[in-house]
Image (tube, grey):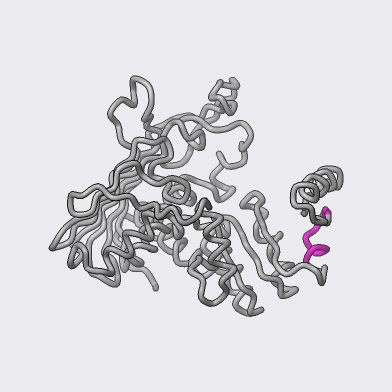
Amino acid sequence: MHDLSPVCCASAAEKYSKLTSAPVKAYHGSTDDIADDPNVDLVVVAVKVPDHKAAVMPAIEKGKDVFVECPLGMTLQETMEIAEAAQRKGVRSIVGLQSWQSPLVRKVKEWISAGKIGKVLSCTWVGSKTAEVAYWAPYHKDRAVYAAYPENGTTVLQVTIGHTLSALISALGPLSSISSACVQRFDTIEFVTPDMTPTGNIIKSTVPDQYAFCGVFKDSGAVLSAICRGGVPVTGESGRGRPSLVWLIDGDKGCIRAESSHVTGSFLHVTTPEKIFLNGEEMNVDDGEDKLDNMGREWLEFAKGAEGYYPTFDDAVLVYKHIDAIARSAREGRRIDLDI
């Protein structure tokens, strides 16, 4: 258990020692100490994104296996540097791209591989970063102020669309090219408490909140059309009848459709859509075999070793190459071919 504050760290270590009925050691300050401990096999990094690299590199250099939450790095370059360090030292890596373990994503991959819809022709994704999810515009949690500033590497593109891309890549493979457009429709960001009460603190928004992108899947040749609708409500009078996700995959012999009106409906790393159809028949994708959430399933796969199905730092680089291509295409007004 590592924390910058010795008091907080000692308190947390005591708490989890009691919960697990096992000793939990406290560390504070630099991560060099935990990296030097011969009794530590794996280091988990779940801190603010700007601190990811400084926290994880000592552990990698000491040969520890490592987990880092998503995004792995603040930029594509930083993400690649972390991944290259892990490769160079030969450590096992795992990153928080939990949509790999989404029951829907795994079932979509299975259905397509089994030929349930024939040859894939196209994929359409209409997703939302809803207003009720208080990050970025128009509302942002006052407990995570740093994430509202784009220089910290936690924009809607890097986080929300990053998780979307991870789900799409896991189910259908990477894209060979991307064209995109983005606009900023909200002028301000209003900070709110956890119960959505305004704090009175309002800042100017400086980043896009609406994204549209299209491309061609490298493996199948199918076309992708996707949009991220930022800041739209799905509850109350303004949100009546408004979906948070519509995902369509058309094949020459059938189709897959998933729909949600949940506030996190497009976040497949945490939510399974309420309605899922295969060739017109409503399906239940929860096999009921375990009670784990997606993160729990990811750890279970990691524990399987080489046989496990989980995202590594290399997969984080792949996702970030798509993120970077979306940003470049919107900025330069041209199609970007991905180097994959």
Residue that sits furthest to the front in the current view: 289
Provide residue 94's location: percent of width, then percent of height.
Answer: 57, 65
Provide residue 288's location: percent of width, then percent of height.
Answer: 43, 52
Residue found 58% across the figure and 59% down from its top? 73
Magenta-span inclusion, residue 34: yes
- Can you tell which quarter of the image residue 177 is in? bottom left
Picture layout, residue 47 above or below residue 73: above
Provide residue 168's location: percent of width, then percent of height.
Answer: 36, 58
Query: Seen in the image, is 138 located left or right of residue 117?
Result: right
Picture layout, residue 287 above or below residue 265: below
Magenta-span inclusion, residue 58: no
Residue found 29% across the figure and 61% down from its top? 335
Residue found 34% across the figure and 23% down from its top? 238
Q: Nearer the viewer, residue 56 or 212?
A: 56
Query: Seen in the image, is 136 located left or right of residue 339?
Result: right
Query: Seen in the image, is 195 located left or right of residue 174?
Result: right
Residue found 64% across the figure and 52% down from its top? 50
Quarter containing the N terminus: bottom right
Picture layout, residue 37 above or below residue 70: below
Query: Number of labelled discs?
Result: 0
Q: Which residues are magenta?
A: 26-35
Q: Nearer the viewer, residue 301 or 238?
A: 301
Picture layout, residue 116 above or below residue 8: below
Quarter containing the C terminus: bottom left
- Can you tell which quarter of the image residue 67 is in? bottom right
- Can you tell which quarter of the image residue 61 is in? bottom right
Q: Nearer the viewer, residue 187 or 90?
A: 90
